[in-house]
Image (spheres, grey):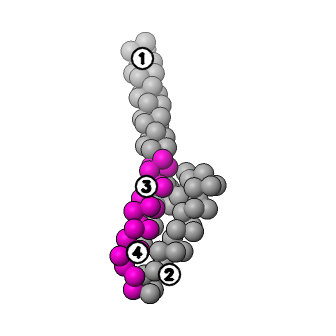
Amino acid sequence: MRHCSVQVRGLLTREELDRYNALMEVGSYLESQQQYDFAYTVQKEVDILILPAIERLKEKSRDRDRATALFLESLREEAEDE
């Protein structure tokens, strides 16, 4: 089973995180039993489950980029005023 990144895991809601942990446990068990076809299905569920958290991470990045652009713009304006 492939884990998602720590950043994505940090943005999961409590309900999503509980479901994620349960799915990872089931998937790991299936892999230990060499039931890779079933583990693949569980991995697909995990991939779908983490999509909202990935979008939240992207939005945080866009917010940070906007804040940086505003800061750089204010520096440029200050430099022009001097």
Cα gap from disc 1 to disc 2, whole angstroms:
59 Å
Q: For the residues carrying marks 4 and 2, which lies nearer the camera in this image?
A: 4
Q: For the residues carrying marks 1 and 2, which lies nearer the camera in this image?
A: 2
Badge 3 density bin: few <14, some 14–19, many ≥20, Cα 10 Å? few
- Of pointers 3 and 4, the one earlier in the residue sequence: 4
Residue 48's label in the rendered image is 3
Q: Which residue is mark 1?
A: 77
Q: Which residue is outermost to the top?
A: 81
Residue at 37% from the left image edge and 71% from the top image edge: 40
Q: Is residue 35 above or below residue 59?
A: below
Write the start and end of the magenta stretch as one range: 34-54
- Of pointers 1 and 4, the one earlier in the residue sequence: 4
Judge whether residue 44 is colored magenta.
yes
Badge 4 density bin: few <14, some 14–19, many ≥20, Cα 10 Å? few
- Look at label 4 and name its amino acid: Phe
Q: Is residue 46 above or below residue 37?
A: above
Q: Which residue is mark 4?
A: 38
- Of pointers 1 and 2, the one earlier in the residue sequence: 2
Q: Quadrant of the C terminus?
A: top left
Marks 1/2 in contact by CB < 8 Å: the verdict is no
Cα gap from disc 2 to disc 3, whole angstroms:
20 Å
- Of pointers 3 and 1, the one earlier in the residue sequence: 3
Cα gap from disc 3 to disc 1, whole angstroms:
45 Å
- Of pointers 2 and 3, the one earlier in the residue sequence: 2
Q: Which residue is outermost to the right?
A: 14
- Look at label 3 and name its amino acid: Ile
- Look at label 2 and name its amino acid: Tyr
Where disc 2 sits, the SS reads helix
Q: Which residue is mark 2?
A: 29
Cα gap from disc 1 to disc 4, whole angstroms:
59 Å
Marks 3/1 in contact by CB < 8 Å: the verdict is no
